[in-house]
Amino acid sequence: MLAVMLTREDVRAAALALPEAYEEEHFDVPSFRVAKKIFCTVHQDQPRIVLKLDPDDQHNLVDGVGLRPVDGAYGRKGWTYAYFESLEADRLATLLRLAWATVAPKRLLNGGGRSAA
């Protein structure tokens, strides 16, 4: 069975399904935010997104293929490239939830905004 390649629309739908997430432009690219903080941006010129992960999560999840740190200081702070065409839908949802949780306010993390990922 062939895997279905994910699209920017799949990323958008998964990001906006998170509690209080919304879309706003950031330097001419779509970004997804919660409480005014970016947890994901979507590149328009290649099939990748940039996620704001906790540095420990980044270290544990980076595989060099579907996920790799952004170069330089941003990467050391947890910003991570994810090549969505090489991800399964469940993994994309999990990664977006982790990124969302990295910047979401505590009131959402403490049960008020949690939904199954």
Image (cartoon, helix red, strand yellow):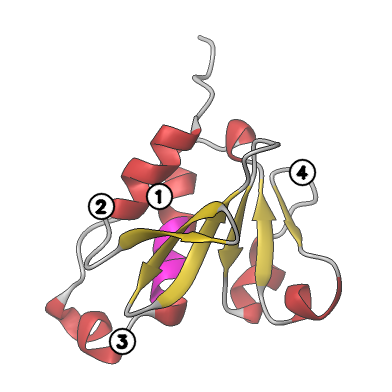
Earlier in the chain: of badge 3 and badge 2, it is 2
Give the residue drawn at x 44%, y 58%: 96
Give the residue drawn at x 67%, y 63%: 80
Earlier in the chain: of badge 2 and badge 1, it is 2
Q: Is residue 43 left or right of residue 68?
A: left
Residue pointed to by mark 1: 93
The label shown at residue 17 is: 2
Residue lying farthest to the right in this orientation = 72
Q: Position of residue 86 (x, y in %)?
A: 63, 33
Q: Position of residue 43 (x, y in %)?
A: 63, 46
Query: Label 1: how many residues lie within 10 Å, few (<14), some (14-19) or many (20+)?
Result: many
Predominant secondary structure in magenta? helix
Q: Is residue 66 left or right of residue 19?
A: right
Q: Which residues are magenta?
A: 96-101
Residue pointed to by mark 3: 105
Give the spatial CA distance, label 2 vs label 1.
9 Å
Along the line of sight, the residue nearer the viewer: 76 or 1: 76
Give the residue drawn at x 50%, y 9%: 1
